Image (cartoon, rainbow, N blue to C red):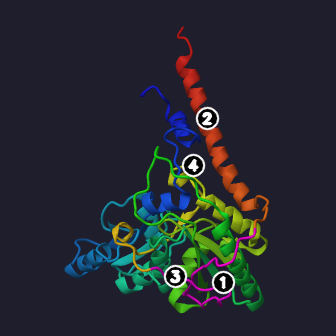
Amino acid sequence: MKHLHWPLLALLLLLPGRADACSIPVFRYALERWKPALFEVVVFHEGALDEATRTRIKAIEDGKPSANLTVTVVDVAGKMEPDHQALWKAQTEKTLPRMVLRFPDADARTPSLLVGALDGDALRSWLSSPARERIVRLLTQGESTVFVLLTSGDATADDAARALLKKELPRLDKLIELPEQSQDGPQLRSSLPLKVALATVEVSRTDAKEKEFVQLLLSSEEGLAKATGPIVLPIFGRGRALCGLSGKDLNARELDGVTRFLCGACSCQVKELNPGADLLIAADWDELLEAPAPEQLPVLPRDAPVIPTGKVRAVAAEEEAVQVEVAPSPTSVRLRWGIAIVGLVVLATGVFALWSRRSPEK
């Protein structure tokens, strides 16, 4: 095996039809196996840490429920890593101790989410909010995907987005079939029922309780913050936003495409090779998945009104689904092409490596 170049090995894992191919849907594979990327809290201080500062840092590290967060303590009087040195230099306020909340894998040029005194209360709203608590509850109860409707304040546009979700999600609930589970390859790890179940959580951009969550959502995709109308973001796994649908992309074809992608077999098991961005959420995912399934949320009739900001509209499917031929959406095409391109690059690299190794020695 040591002679098998890693890109070719990776391609073998991607190829369908193999005995070890994965039949688990993307949304479930992500929920059970993909660890969320870690946001970073950089704590700047000078000299020996006093007891009060140590206590505050420990409170952040030991917070319950835990968040996808890591704490890095940096002594500005000592030798700093180049990245931290640049980050400290960029601070306009030098009062210590000072904390900076950053995106995963951020550098000094990446805008920080929070900058200020070392204060756990100020950080708490970045880790949890009513909408995120609802999303965690739904995903750990077996919902396939939670479609977050980020309203814009334009009543006409927001109503149109609500109507679209109200019409399409119940149809997709009944129309889309999950892959038949194989005894080969990865197996389900939790006892949650495997089903297509699509829910909606509505969040207003002006909701003070969701201010930080709104900023995280708008930062999940480049250019998304510039969208002025309503945005729909499919959230799956352990709080991963697949994409943002807005403007002309907020339509039935796009909803169909992203739902089919998330409910399809996980052809690429490496999280980083899949589209999406992890959100900052406080949740003990492993514990929640191991706990006995709680009572299901009440199922509302299809014509029930959408509950306002931060509340959940459970999606029901009481009517017969209409079999409609839906053309591949631009988003679904982009997702498929992305995976295809990765596979082609891996294949080309692997073939070249094998050809190089097998060339006769002079």
Residue under circle 2? Answer: 347
- Badge 2: how crowded within 10 Å, few (<14), some, or many (20+)? some
* Secondary structure that dominates the magenta span: loop
Residues in magenta, as a range: 296-322
Give the quadrant of residue 147: bottom right
Q: Which residue is mark 3?
A: 212
Q: Is 312 on the left or on the right of 281, as rendered?
A: right
Instruction: Look at the image and say whether residue 192 sits in the magenta stretch.
Output: no
Cα separation, mark 2 vs mark 1, equals 47 Å
Label 3 sits on what residue type? Glu
- Of mark 2 and mark 1, the one earlier in the sequence is 1
Mark 1 or mark 3, whichever is nearer to me: 1
Task: For marks 4 and 3, give the one nearer the viewer.
Answer: 4
Mark 1 vs mark 4, foreground winner is 1
The residue at the far left in this view is: 51
Q: Disc 4 marks which residue? A: 267
Q: Toward the viewer: 12 or 299?
A: 299
Of the pair 299 and 218, the residue shown nearer to us: 299
Real-space Cα separation, disc 4 to disc 3, in angstroms: 33 Å
User: For the residue carrying disc 1, how many other residues have a C-alpha within 10 Å: few (<14), some (14-19), or many (20+)?
Assistant: some
Left or right: 90, with 229 as reference point: left
* Label 4 close to label 3 by CB (< 8 Å): no
- The residues bearing labels 3 and 2 have C-alpha atoms spaced at a distance of 42 Å
Q: Inspect the image, locate mark 1, and give the three-letter code of the amino acid beneath it.
A: Arg
Would you say residue 299 sits in the magenta stretch?
yes
